[in-house]
């Protein structure tokens, strides 16, 4: 196990015509010993390049990567005490599972053969693949191959695990199973792990912390709940969550927000108005699950309520995504699956002020987010079953 630190790490690629592309731009992350950190972002954001630089498979243009107190910029990949699990599994097709798992130890250590064999057996039992040790990769399912790839990394007992979208080739059910298995293994082994994915569900459910990248720039490093409920900026707010957060361009007029398309006006309390810091051009945001929807009339005097029409209802079993029309604006709400609601109905929607987000229009900087304390209060106030 080891603490891993990235300090202003930058990677610049030079194209054939001499143009430079900054793939990773001064990324700094301090990964604690034993932490499970998830690197997440859209395709091309620099997350896999960052992982490859930690592994030593990609040179660093500038900055430092430290493993505990050692700068490892120039340390060859084979000497970094780091094990990597690839998206493609990268198993040797002509070798048995046993040979695949033992090969790294045979090539990089002086460990006796009997000790290697014992470690392979022990790891295979941990991964539930002990009956597969004498099979070739071509005789295995995708899930079994993934377990072998993980076992090959675990058997080395490295200081750091690096995982580059290791579950992306699996079907949805197996991915869910493997997510749980990976979390259990990481907690059991206590090995520092950096995990790359574009899947928000994996990021939210697996990581102790999430590092969100966009265009090579680090946007936020925080716990999953903090990234979701207290995003640093407009990009993080829009990237995290499915369906995505609802947004509207608004202008501050006195103590009210006025939507640019005239679809709604929204009064703000003095405390929320204070958070705005005198900025007048804002982006209003609210997550679909925070939009309250009722088919009966509202309270009549609640200025946070608006009349909308139901366009589409997307059933998902335990919940429904409801697409509503507020003026010319589409609003997405997520409601309980048993709540009766149909397309064509007229609904009252409410945006609770405790759940809204406000961003500076020019920079995307978050000015106001819901507090995690308010979420705890809301949960405590709900009746128990």
Image (cartoon, helix red, strand yellow):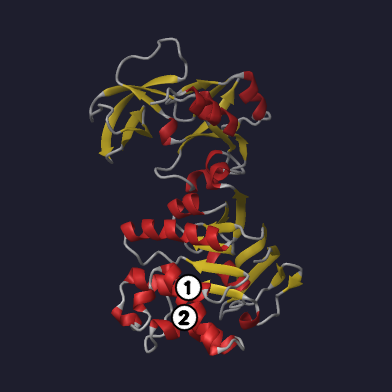
Image coordinates for residue 129, horizontal then vertical, percent: 38, 72
Above or below: residue 345 compared with residue 120: above
> Which of 242 and 337 lies nearest the eye of the viewer?
337
> Which of 221 and 268 lies nearest the eye of the viewer?
221
> Which of 38 and 9 lies nearest the eye of the viewer?
38
Quarter containing the N terminus: bottom right
Q: Quadrant of residue 262?
A: top left
Mark pair 2, 1: CA separation: 9 Å
* Residue occupying image coordinates x 59% and y 19%: 269
Label 1 SS = helix
Q: Which of labels 2 and 1 is toward the front? A: 1
Q: Residues within 10 Å of mark 2 (few under 14, many from 20)?
A: many
Circle on res. 101? 2
Quarter containing the C terminus: top left
Question: Does residue 19 show up?
Answer: no
* Residue occupying image coordinates x 68% and y 73%: 61
Image coordinates for residue 160, horizontal then vertical, percent: 60, 68
**Is 148 on the left-hand or right-hand side of 18?**
left
Circle on res. 372? none
Image coordinates for residue 278, horizontal then vertical, percent: 67, 28
Image coordinates for residue 110, horizontal then vertical, percent: 62, 89
Above or below: residue 144 compared with residue 105: above
Q: Are marks 2 and 1 in contact (CB under 8 Å)?
A: yes
Circle on res. 123? 1
Tell me how many marks there are. 2
Label 2 SS = helix
Q: Quadrant of residue 64?
A: bottom right
* Residue occupying image coordinates x 61% and y 86%: 109
Above or below: residue 241 compared with residue 351: below
> Which of 257 and 196 lies nearest the eye of the viewer?
196
Q: Residues within 10 Å of mark 1 (few under 14, many from 20)?
A: many
């Amino acid at each position: 196990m080891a603490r891993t630190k990235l300090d202003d790490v930058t990677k610049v690629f030079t194209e054939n015509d001499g143009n430079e592309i900054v793939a990773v731009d001064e990324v700094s992350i301090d990964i604690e010993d034993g932490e499970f950190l998830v690197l997440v972002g859209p395709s091309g954001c620099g997350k896999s390049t960052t992982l490859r630089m930690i592994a030593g498979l990609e040179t660093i243009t500038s900055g430092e990567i430290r493993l505990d107190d050692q700068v490892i910029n120039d340390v060859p990949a084979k000497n970094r005490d780091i094990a990597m699990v690839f998206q493609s599994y990268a198993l040797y097709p002509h070798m048995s599972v046993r040979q695949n798992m033992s090969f790294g130890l045979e090539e990089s250590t002086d460990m006796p053969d009997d000790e290697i064999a014992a470690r392979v057996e022990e790891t295979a039992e941990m991964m539930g693949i002990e009956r597969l040790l004498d099979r070739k990769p071509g005789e295995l399912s995708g899930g079994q191959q993934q377990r072998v790839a993980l076992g090959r990394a675990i058997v080395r007992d490295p200081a750091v695990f690096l995982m580059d979208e290791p579950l992306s080739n699996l079907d949805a059910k197996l991915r869910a199973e493997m997510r749980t298995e990976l979390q259990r293994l990481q907690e059991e082994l206590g090995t520092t792990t950096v995990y790359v994915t574009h899947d928000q569900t994996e990021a939210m459910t697996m990581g102790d912390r999430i590092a969100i990248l966009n265009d090579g720039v680090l946007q936020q490093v925080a716990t999953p709940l903090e990234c979701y409920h207290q995003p640093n900026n407009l990009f993080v707010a829009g990237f995290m969550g499915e369906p995505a957060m609802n947004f509207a361009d608004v202008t501050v007029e006195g103590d009210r927000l006025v939507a640019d398309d005239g679809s709604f006006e929204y009064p703000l309390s003095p405390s929320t108005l204070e958070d705005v810091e005198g900025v007048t051009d804002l982006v209003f945001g609210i997550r679909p699950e925070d939009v309250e929807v009722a088919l009966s009339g509202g309270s009549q005097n609640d200025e946070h309520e608006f009349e909308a029409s139901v366009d589409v209802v997307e059933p998902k079993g335990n919940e429904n995504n409801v697409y509503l029309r507020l003026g010319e604006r589409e609003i997405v709400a997520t409601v309980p699956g048993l709540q009766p609601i149909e397309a064509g109905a007229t609904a009252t929607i409410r945006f609770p002020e405790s759940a809204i987000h406000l961003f500076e229009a020019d920079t995307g900087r978050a000015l106001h987010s819901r507090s995690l304390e308010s979420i705890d209060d809301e949960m405590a106030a709900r009746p128990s079953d």
